[in-house]
Image: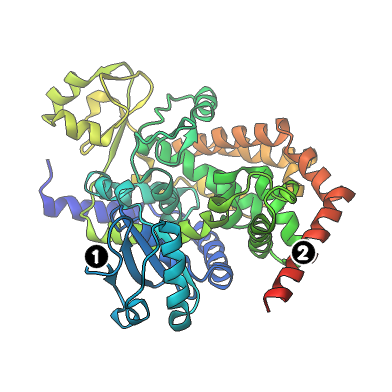
């Protein structure tokens, strides 16, 4: 084993040498910065959401809707008038002196807002969910740099990609939702099964390092389709049809770019739900409150990812493609690692690693299989060129949903496949999945009807009029 000092020297050199091409970096960073500027305009409170996942459960956090800074946290249960309140700005406690607190939690939250907003300006508040992430940081925080390098290989800035993973799984590979979504980025089991059938290599969905390339490739493809990470992130959460409706509504409201269209349409849906949940349902369907907040929550937790990477010593992850089934006992005997340590690198591993899948360890063990950690090596020029060209494809859901555009996507898929690389195979696999979804789902027909329906347009106009009247009445 390497000494600790030499270990981190090797890691630093490896990560520097494995950087994606300059063109890929420029494209990805330009896309992210363009998004961030729009987020700051439409959702300036986005930094607030980092606190939700870094403060233990059992608190209600209040922050500024103007810039997202934390104001105070109150206990979910218990006394709101004593020392249980943690003030970031103690000078704001006076408006709550002598308050008679309601019994219901929602009423208490509303009372805090009404008393503090004259001094603070608009507030945002939410229960904390730190236990979703915090216990996983000692286990998986050391892998952030490695996973980040994987995301960046596919043209996705590490912090935005892993911030989504923070929201979805708390970085836990064994996370499983009630809807049977699995692992790092919480894809449904049936979707992983489809990808597993398309991939030449076995995909174990509970291993974060197995998932990361596919999560990254998918986000790269969606952000290219939209020309923005904002609707791409939202599609992962609320579905392509919901995002399509949101963008169309935002376009009707005057949004000039995909980012503006998304946020205008999102605000429109949010406000109409508050006016009458059922009457305007055809304009937003299942696009709900979490959908409304999702993108800003991801952007807010980019800081969370950055802090983990800088505060937690990082470890290298080696990857071996197995030629045969490997038993857990064989792995621990050869490496002298504990079962817990082997499973930290491989959460899916209970008894054995299937043949033609990937084993992850803190050292390379050639007898376990070929080393396939592509993120440790500079990207092959064939892959870099294919990715650079792909990221430059013209965005727009109408264009991508047009059957004539499939030949362009298929050409990209063949080009990635022809690189003969690990990352090229991942991109080809995920592109096959996306092409199939675009062509076989009813998304194109549903969105075309939504765009051209006189009934929908009339409902949209009535919704606009009712919101305008509601604003005028309040004023």
Front one among 48 and 234: 48
Where residue 48 sits in the image (x, y, percent)?
A: 42, 66
Judged from the image, the secondary structure of the residue bearing numbered disc 2 is helix
On screen, residue 101 versus residue 241, left or right, reads left
Q: Nearer the viewer, residue 361 or 281?
A: 281
**Residue shown at 13%/45% (left/top)?**
2
Q: Is residue 189 above or below residue 51?
A: above
Q: Residue 440 got which mark?
A: none
Residue 207 location (% of width, % of height): 35, 33
Determine whether, in the image, residue 351 is placed left or right of residue 403: left
Location of residue 154 in the rendering, given as x and y in whole percent from the top left corner: 49, 48
Q: Which residue is mark 1?
A: 84
Q: Is residue 287 left or right of residue 253?
A: left
Pointer 2 residue:
466
The quadrant of the rendering that contains the N terminus is: top left
Q: Quarter of the image for the C terminus: give it.
A: bottom right
Location of residue 218 by image quarter: top right
Mark 2 surroundings: few (<14), some (14-19) or many (≥20) residues within 10 A: some
Q: Is residue 313 shown above or below 354?
A: below
How busy is the neighbourhood of tag 1: few (under 14 within 10 Å), some, or many (20 plus)?
some
Which secondary structure, mark 1?
loop
Q: Is residue 239 visible?
A: yes
Quadrant of residue 68 in the image? Answer: bottom left
């Amino acid at each position: 084993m390497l000494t600790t000092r030499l270990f981190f020297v090797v890691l630093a050199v490896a990560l520097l040498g494995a950087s994606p091409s300059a063109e890929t970096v420029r494209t990805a960073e330009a896309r992210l910065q363009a998004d961030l500027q729009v987020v700051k305009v439409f959702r300036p409170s986005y930094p607030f959401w980092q606190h939700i996942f870094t403060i233990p459960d059992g608190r209600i956090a209040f922050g500024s809707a103007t810039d997202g800074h934390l104001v105070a946290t109150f206990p979910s249960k218990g006394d709101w008038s004593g020392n249980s309140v943690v003030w970031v700005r103690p000078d704001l406690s006076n408006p709550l002196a002598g308050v008679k607190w309601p019994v219901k939690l929602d009423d208490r939250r509303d009372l805090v807002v009404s008393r503090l907003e004259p001094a603070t300006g608009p507030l945002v508040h939410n229960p904390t969910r730190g236990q979703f992430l915090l216990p996983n940081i000692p286990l998986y925080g050391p892998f952030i740099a490695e996973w980040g390098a994987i995301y960046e290989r596919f043209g996705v800035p590490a912090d935005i990609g892993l911030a989504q993973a923070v929201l979805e799984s708390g970085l836990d590979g064994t996370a499983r939702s009630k809807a049977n979504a699995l692992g790092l980025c919480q894809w449904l089991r049936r979707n992983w099964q489809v990808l597993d059938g398309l991939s030449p290599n076995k995909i174990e969905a509970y291993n974060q390092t197995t998932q990361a390339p596919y999560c990254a490739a998918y986000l790269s493809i969606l952000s290219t389709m939209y020309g923005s990470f904002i609707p791409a992130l939202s599609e992962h959460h609320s579905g392509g049809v919901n995002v399509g409706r949101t963008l169309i509504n935002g376009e009707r409201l005057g949004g000039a770019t995909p980012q503006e269209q998304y946020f205008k349409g999102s605000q429109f849906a949010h406000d109409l739900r508050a006016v009458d949940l059922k009457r305007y349902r055809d304009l937003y369907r299942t696009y709900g409150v979490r959908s409304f907040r999702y993108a800003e929550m991801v952007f807010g937790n980019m800081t969370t990812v950055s802090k983990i990477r800088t505060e937690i010593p990082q470890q290298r992850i080696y990857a071996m493609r197995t030629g045969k089934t490997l038993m857990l006992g064989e792995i621990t005997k050869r490496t002298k690692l504990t079962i817990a340590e082997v499973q930290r690198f491989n959460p899916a591993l209970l008894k054995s690693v299937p043949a033609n899948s990937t084993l992850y360890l803190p050292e390379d063990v050639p007898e376990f299989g070929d080393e396939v950690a592509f993120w440790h090596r500079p990207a092959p020029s064939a892959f870099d060129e294919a990715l650079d060209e792909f990221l430059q494809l013209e965005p727009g859901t109408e264009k991508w949903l047009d059957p004539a555009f499939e030949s362009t996507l298929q050409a990209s898929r063949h080009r990635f496949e022809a690189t003969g690389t690990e990352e090229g195979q991942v991109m080809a696999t995920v592109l096959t999945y996306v092409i199939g979804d675009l062509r076989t789902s009813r998304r194109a027909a549903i969105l075309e009807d939504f765009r051209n329906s006189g009934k929908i347009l009339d409902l949209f106009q009535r919704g606009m009029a009712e919101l305008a009247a509601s604003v005028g009445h309040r004023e």
